[in-house]
Amino acid sequence: MHRFLRISVLLTGLFAAVSVYAAESLQTTQMTEDSLGPLVEQPIEFPHNRHAGDAGKGGMEINCMYCHTYARRSAVAGIPPLQKCIGCHQGIESVREAPRIKKLFEYWDAKKAVPWKKVHDLPDFVRFNHERHIKRFVEQQNRPFQEVCGYCHGDVKEMTVARRSKALSMGWCASCHQKDHAVVAEGGTQIGSQAYWYTFYKPEATDGSTDVLKAKGPNDCWQCHK
Amino acid sequence: MMDSGFDRRDFLKVMGWSGAAVALSGCGNTSIEDGKETVVSYVEAADFVIPGIGVYYNSSCAQCDAGCSINGKVREGRVLKLEGNPASGINNGKMCGLGQAGVQHHYNPDRVREPLLRNGNQGEAISWEKAYALIAEKLDGVSGEEIAFLSGGVSGHLKVLLGNYLSSFGCKNHFVYEALSPGVVRAANKKAYGVEMPRYNINKAKVVLSFGADFLGAWVSPVHFSQQYAQFRNGADGQRGVLIQVEPKMTLTGANADRWVPIRPGTEGILALGIINALGTATGDIAAAVKNYDKVRVSKETGVPPGQIDKIAAILKLRSPSLVLAGGAAEGYAHGSQNAAAINLLNHVLGNVGKTIVAPVTVPFPQMAPAKGNTAALKSLNDGLAAGNFKVLFNYAANPVYTAPGAMKFKDNMAKAEFKVAFTHYLDETALQADLVLPLDSALEDWGTQVPEYMTEGAQINILQPLMENLHPNTRGMGEILLALIKQRRPEEYKNYEDYYAYLRAALVQNKNAFGGHSMDDDTFWNETLTKGIIKLAGTTTALNGGTNVSSLKLPTPAEQDEQFPLQLIPSVNISLRDGRNSNQPWLQESPDPLTTIVWDSWMEIHPKKAAELGIVEGDIVEVTSRVGSIKTQAYLFPGIHPDAISIPIGQGHEAMGRYAKGYGVNPFKIIDTVFDRETGELAMHETRVKVSKTGQRVIIVKDESAAGAKQVREKIAGRVSTDNVDLSKEV
Ligand code: SF4
């Protein structure tokens, strides 16, 4: 008897907790594909538009990869080291006294990292691989960096500090993988354990071929949920 | 033990529900957090540093004394995973589970982070300057004889520096103590082979007869021996090697053996002589010494059936070379040296010396050779403390308040020293008794060199280097501390070394020619050394020159049945917890014991027959009483133990040392009799006799094996033939 009491108390507590959580999450507005994330206040208001924007609009058209160099080399994009900012800015006298640059040099002189806030923060159980996406779109399909980065990060060259402009939910990932970018696996072997979950499909044989399989997106849960 | 009404299964059920609930609520966009977490970039980054991609550094494992070389994966400045360094001849790229848990030593939440000075029952955080000044003040006016330095095994430059520090105030009292050390075997080897630790070629042997040497688990250099064992099983000549393990309590090695021979505790030497007798090849003195050890007598005294003795002798005769090892189970008696000597004699008779037992190599720098720990050192320190001889006591890498036999009263004796300094990572039992506690860097943060006691064909010096920055800003490396302390005494001599790194670098670079760096400039040599993590050098070989003097060989006949304390206590060595210094690493607590699969607790192994006699079933809480004291733990019925013995693993029962160690299980050291080996003065760990009584309580043992409460006994996994009916030569 005792035991059942204890279990039911535990379960009741648990459901109470979950329903509170669920109720709260309902209140957040439903995201559309392009709905914006909140404005995030950064220690230094970094003007992406000034650095990457079109020359016609006062930008310098610097390639995304110049600063975000890790994105094409690693799963995580990281944040450029402070040294990178200083590398250029110590030679740019014209803005040396601007408040943001002064603040930048304060961090540099103290040899302290700038405590940037994460803008595109996926949950910890999701592993997104930057390198893989850049390889596919830029190296294999020769699309420009700004376009490719923009698939997920939006039109950063128009922003000052970055702001999330895509939903970045699993359904949103699937919408792209399903629609446009079928993944071909060679050799006729099945790829992994086929996630039927959500809208990722198991590989299908293509017409007229017995050994080439076509799939839409990652076929294993663990590709993203390691 | 789990004895609340709310059992594990219910708990898991509820957890399952909550998992599903979380999964449901986790869909959608709610878990994307914008602008909440900080992402810290590098200020300056080296070219090779890419977030998300590991950088690898070579260093050395410090979890036990085997001296394996490791390779650590570091990501974003954090060490994540250790692997073996393939360049090391000792571990050839492999590691053991204990070594893997090294990261949990490093990240352990219970590490001491500030120097602490005793203030009543509290430790008050003080600065390092104050701590150093305090040591200088306390040493002032105290003579060298009144100072004692207790340490675990040390080697390399740390040993050199420590020696110099001690000699700077004329102190000769360096006590090197390891609770589990093959001290008796070393002494017996010295007599039999002329060296304390010869090199064993398990891989070249065709038969290995091991008297309780758990070389696959916890003996001397287990990773190395495991690799040799794999070759031995493949067979040098295509014939699979045969392993026979003789011991009263089954070890991991015993569980792997072709024949596991349970023997009455303490009679290993008698069996060895019995085998020599059965071989019938000995002549002269040796033949005379063994002539009374005929099968009937030996069988009666050891409990090993005569047919078994014949079979062992037959296979040893048939297949040569073989290798006979004496390990922990044979040496732990008042006559341990005699046991070991008899076992080593067997190697001489079989002609193994020079074949599977060969000359070891040593580094050509004797001052760096390891100071090997033993238990005799503990006794002399304890006697000195009891007599009030020491005013100041330093303690490093030893935890005698926990590992000293209860009857030694080490804790009380330690209190007699006026000022006690502990260099430590955790507030363990001994550190809690200290007046000044100095927090150390973890082994993954520190600089150093190691010279392993057991080396393979070539000699090597292992490099210890930080895999990452200090986790806690106020810990220091042991070398760093010693350097600061020695600067107090000999400022002139050491003024050129800004820190221990500078000292180490200078010391190694200065000798670079001896380390194969003739053609390199200093920087290149140093960078190469750090990159490799190992300095390999042509060692000096000490030839074997021992003898077969049997005149002093005297093996006592086993004692009569003791009515009051009928059972022999075997404090067993678990492959993960060893002497208990790593018990606060939860991976090790969580790794099931290989034979019983029990986790996070102690247990008493008892033979099912004996248990039936005493009315004990699995999970009964029993009280194990020796002449010295008693402890209570859960009973586990285990066919791999001699019916006259019970066994309790070492390593649990901590009263301090943090959340993962304190309060789990019991500490068998508490009830060990203080009996010593007559020749070497080493603690005879297996000499304690006990009685077992039920307390009336019963628990469900938490273990991996089968359903809780199920028995291992009589469940046949593979067909078994009783040992008498097996023809060993046909088996292979
Ligand atoms: S045997 Fe010892 S040194 Fe080697 S990996 Fe294991 S714990 Fe480390």
Image (cartoon, coloured by chain):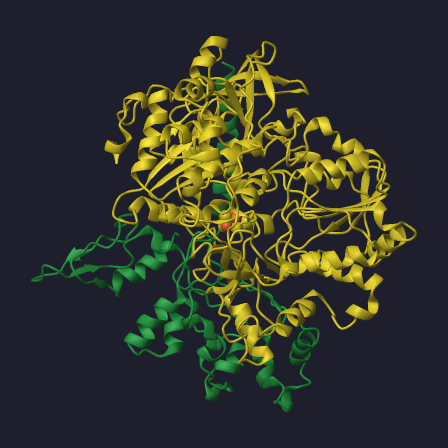
Chain colours: A green, B yellow
- In the rendered image, the vertical position of residue B441 relative to residue A89, given as above or below: above
Q: Residue at x 47, y 9 (%)?
A: B613
Q: Nearer the viewer, residue A144 or B291?
A: B291
Which of the image's four quarters has the C terminus of chain B? top left
Which residue, as the protein is rendered here, is positioned at the far front? Answer: B284
How many circles with numbers are drawn on the protein? 0
Q: Nearer the viewer, residue B114 or B604?
A: B604
Which of the image's four quarters has the N terminus of chain B? top right
Is residue B107 visible from the viewing direction of this image? no
Residue B52 placement (x, y as % from top left) = 47, 64
Q: Residue at x 33, y 51 (%)?
A: A221
Q: Quadrant of residue B731?
A: top left
Residue B658 placement (x, y as % from top left) = 65, 39
Is residue A195 visible from the viewing direction of this image? yes
Which residue, as the protein is rendered here, is positioned at the far right? Answer: B141
Q: Residue at x 56, y 54 (%)?
A: B452
Q: Quadrant of residue A176?
A: bottom left
Position of B672 with respect to B326 (left or right) is: right
Which residue, as the protein is rendered here, is positioned at the far left? Answer: A208
Position of B712 with respect to B455 (left or right) is: left
Q: Quadrant of residue A35?
A: bottom left
Q: Nearer the viewer, residue B189 or B23?
A: B189
Residue B597 placement (x, y as % from top left) = 44, 31
Residue B648 placement (x, y as % from top left) = 55, 26
Q: Nearer the viewer, residue A109 or B568?
A: B568
- In the rendered image, the vertical position of residue B633 relative to residue A217, given as above or below: above
